[in-house]
Amino acid sequence: MKIETIEDLYQQKVLIIFKHLVSIGCSKEDAEDIVQNTFYKAIENMIHLEVTNISAWLFKVSIHQFYDLCRRSQRFPKVNIDDDAFISFFIQEETGEDFVLLKELHGDVHNLLDELKPSYKNLLVLKYDLGLSYEEISVMLDMKVETIRTTLYRARKEFKQKWREKNERRS
């Protein structure tokens, strides 16, 4: 791998890796550090790396570093959904009551995502929070598109089931 390739790859992937780390609960400062360490590892090991999909390798290394950070600090990741975008999507005029209700809804979605398997949570965040296509997720995770579709179907199904159970308990 050449230095120019690393620079091009950095320009293409740094923002998407950073956004994904933040969306799965990483603080912005930690996400910056993880992205920097990930590319440092790529540069350090570029002679020895024999990876067919370097983008997937970078993505996986950054995710594993985040999980290591969580284990070390005994924190559990929280999904970071942009409140302003989330709220403006649902309502045009905000009232205090609407804002509180949407905050509660946001917290409920957040908690349900945390109850899912990490692979389900990651795929749901990539698809619906970052807005990536099946093909983009496939390339990023180095998985077949069919596998992504099937796993996302299962993740949505489990999320819906947990959502219904939670709302039935409230009723």
Image (cartoon, helix red, strand yellow):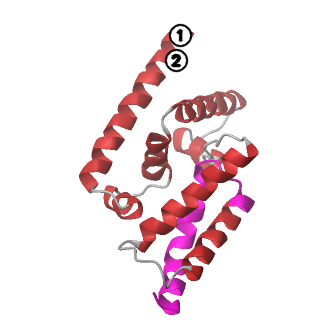
Q: Which residue is mark 2?
A: 166
Left or right: 116, with 111 as reference point: left
Question: Can residue 145 be seen in this snapshot?
Answer: yes
Specify the quadrant of the image occupied by residue 97: top right
Question: In the rendering, at what x and y percent does residue 19 appear?
Answer: 58, 60
Question: In the rendering, at what x and y percent does residue 137 appear?
Answer: 38, 58
Vertical position of residue 99 compared to residue 133: above or below: above
Query: Mark 2 and mark 1 in contact (Cβ < 8 Å)?
Result: yes
Vertical position of residue 154 compared to residue 10: above or below: above
For this rendering, which residue is in front, 87 or 10?
Answer: 10
For this rendering, which residue is in front, 121 or 69?
Answer: 69
**Residue 23 is covered by the magenta coloring:** yes
Q: Residues within 10 Å of mark 2 (few under 14, many from 20)?
A: few
Q: Residue at x 72, y 48 (%)?
A: 72
Q: Estimate the spatial distance between the alpha carbons at disc 1 and disc 2, rounded to whole Å.
A: 5 Å
Range covered by the magenta-colored residues:
1-30
Question: In the rendering, at what x and y percent does residue 84 appear?
Answer: 64, 48
Q: Secondary structure at mark 1?
A: helix
- Kind of residue indicated by mark 2: Lys
Question: In the rendering, at what x and y percent does residue 9 appear?
Answer: 49, 80
Q: Which residue is mark 1?
A: 169
Q: How many numbered markers are drawn?
A: 2
Q: Residue at x 42, y 50 (%)?
A: 127
Q: Residue at x 50, y 41 (%)?
A: 118
